[in-house]
Amino acid sequence: MQTIDSRDGAAPGDMSAALSGVRVLIVEDEALIALAVETLLRDFGCDVVAVAYHVSEALGVARSLPIDIALLDVNVAGKEVFPVADTLLSRSIPFVFASGYGVNALRADLRRHPLVHKPFAPQELRRALEDVLAGRRA
């Protein structure tokens, strides 16, 4: 497992104007990865609204909290994250998948959504989030 150093590609406090204040939901079952991603996103200027370690928890957040974008691990504690993606789609909330399994791990109808491959570089995640928020396919 590779840890993500928030300093790679961005100095602490090096916020992206495009991500400043963006409310993010992180769905990730690996605590160390979730913590590293949360730190990285905060360094980008994001407001991490919630970190969900289970699909059921993520569904509650996705249904109720104000969020601007989500980062979704594809396999969360042995369950596919696709119900969360469906909920986000119903609310017109964009998302980026994160997976080490590749695009074939995605449900066919969700393959048009961006995927960052684990392990990812901080600048790769930043670019994917910025592209999605700007309406571009990452």
Image (cartoon, rainbow, N blue to C red):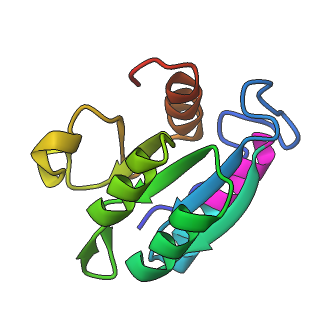
Q: Does residue 5 appear in this view?
A: no
Classify residue 34 as left or right of residue 46. Answer: left
Residue 98 belongs to magenta span: no
Which residue does the image show at 66% across and 33% down from the upper left? 9
Instruction: Residue 59: name its quadrant.
Output: bottom left
**Viewed as shown, does residue 116 lie left or right of 122?**
left
Residue 117 seen in render: yes
Q: In which quarter of the image is the N terminus?
A: bottom left
Magenta stretch, main secondary structure class: helix
Residue 44 lies in the magenta-colored region: yes
- State which quarter of the image contains the C terminus: top left
Q: In this view, does 54 lie above or below 113?
A: below
Tell me: 39 left or right of 87.
right
In the rendered image, the residue lying farthest to the right is 13
The residue stretch that appears in magenta: 37-45
Q: Position of residue 72 (x, y in %)?
A: 42, 57
3 to 13, vertically: above or below: below
Residue 12 sits in which quadrant?
top right
Q: Where is residue 21 in the image (x, y as percent from the top left)?
A: 81, 41
Which sits in the foreground, 110 or 104?
110
Could you tell me residue 56's position as x and y percent? 42, 81
